[in-house]
Amino acid sequence: MKFGPVPVAEAEGTILAHSARLTGRVLKKGHTLSADDIALFNEEGIPEITVARLEADDIPENEAAALITAALAGENVKAGDAFTGRCNLIAKARGLLLFDTNRLNEINLIDETVTIATLPAYDLTSEGQLVATIKIIPFAISKSILDQVIAAISGQALVSIAAFKPKSIGLILTRLPGMKESILDKTHETAANRAIEFGSNIAEEIRCGHTEHDVVTAINELQSKNCDIILIFGASAVVDREDVLPAGVVQAGGRVDHFGMPVDPGNLLFIGGLGDTPVVGMPGCARSPKLNGFDWVLWRLLADVSVKREDIMLMGAGGLLKEISERGQLRQDGTGTAPAREPKIAGLLLAAGSSRRMGEENKLLTDIDGTAMVARVAKQIQKSKAEGILVVTGHEAKDVTAALQNLATGFVHNSDYADGLSTSLKAGLNALPDDIDGVIVCLGDMPLLEARHIDQLITAFDPIEGRSICVPVHGRKRGNPVLWGKQFIAEILAVTGDIGARHLLEEHADQVIEVPVDQDGVLFDVDTPERLAEFRNRST
């Protein structure tokens, strides 16, 4: 790849190295320059720009990122779409993140141009959560480097998720003379909440004396109940392998594989088994719902991930848990940070206009191959990655609602629709849920809009990297729909009259990303009978 300044006249087909703000346009770095772009630079009187020019052996950043990500994806993990050299791995299930740290390090050491970042191994995952990101640092990498990376992966998916499985758990609680039953009740409740959170349950509970004989009897009874996992919580902490609880496991015909763990709180845990049934001696800290070493062991068992002696002995790195907040576990106080995930982009369909320029006909209800025009648009939104379709109605609301009955996830009526487009925007934005990251505002009179156009905008959306407003561009023209980050909703709500929010694109140019679209459906709307006739001619 060659990098440096070139005359604008020689820049077509190269990659823009630095973002450029032109009259009415913002071209971000990484944009491949077209003839239309060159014309814009010439009109601005800019003679020279800095670009990157790919050579024959170069693999473009998005292609390279997509290929590496696909090779890395294992069970219960899917690859996202590549954009600006970044491609993510996304969880398809709730479970534990699994990968070989040594293999990951080997790949990251191949070359500075390829980076893979993941959540910590054995971290909890939820469906839709971002678990890894692959970033190509320059605009392209050489084929030889890509080949080395793919070879290092060796056809064996590196990143996978072990999904949690429903387990039937047996719980033994020992007591000493004078111990209050309320303490055992609380211990049971905490253990049950831990199991329920991951789809399992305490199927059997036995309370007995804190003696080796009583523990053996309880274990034998739980064995006969075919429990998948046996947990033992002692009235007194285990201080030695010969103590009551581990000795009882051995006396019952089981084994103790390991005692103690380099995790605090959680040091005094032991783990063993009765045949194939895992047995865990719970540390005293497990009476509390706060994160402790027992959780790390339980999560693995609930996901059918083996826990060997060496596994526990290697938990020391990151094992000091006393001062860290919980990782968003539902049973705790909610102080943990929410996990990264794909953005939640709401679909907002404006369908309130009175079609004054169309005459008596409501353009939104115009029949197109047996489907109302507005329903044609709604179907594309439904097929896209947008989260639901909130429809704003106004003129002929009853008929519009009927046309969208099986497509929309919600309706809001704008009684002030005659006062302009801004009133419909406000009505829709005010009705959106609070948990969205952004909204893609679609117009009901754009019959050539496709789901892939919407998905391109959602893929481009990344506020952290300065892409909070995503605008489709075909040729030299910006089109619709526009994706707005949630932080701009308040400003859009302040707009008045028969206009949208286009002026905000200039005010927040640093957050705008123009997304090239290869088809003019993002520019084509039906406002007049002539425009409708043009559409019908194109469709035949």
Image (cartoon, rainbow, N blue to C red):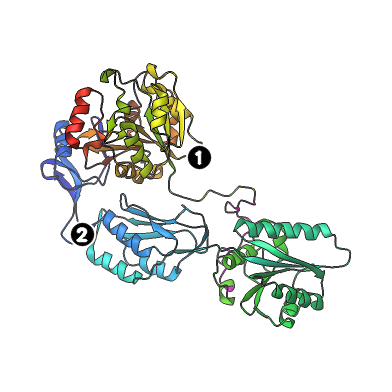
Residue 6 location in percent, x, y?
14, 45
**Which amino acid, mark 2?**
Asp
Residue 53 lies, with reference to residue 351, above or below; the image says below
Residue ID at (59%, 58%): 198
Mark closer to the chain start, 1 or 2: 2
Tell me the residue that label 2 is attached to. Answer: 58
The reply, left or right, for residue 432 in relation to residue 268 is left
**Which amino acid, mark 1?**
Asp
Is residue 244 among the parts visible in the rendering?
no
Q: Quadrant of the C terminus?
A: top left
Q: Quadrant of residue 245?
A: bottom right
Is residue 275 among the parts visible in the rendering?
yes
State which mark lies toward you, 1 or 2: 1
Q: Which mark is residue 435?
A: 1
Judge by depth and name the residue closer to the eye, 82 or 368. Answer: 368
Residue 350 location in percent, x, y?
37, 29
Judge by depth and name the residue closer to the eye, 211 or 293. Answer: 211
Q: Which residues are magenta?
A: 313-332
Q: Quadrant of residue 108?
A: bottom left
- Give the main secondary structure, helix, strand or loop, of the magenta stretch: loop
Residue ID at (80%, 78%): 212
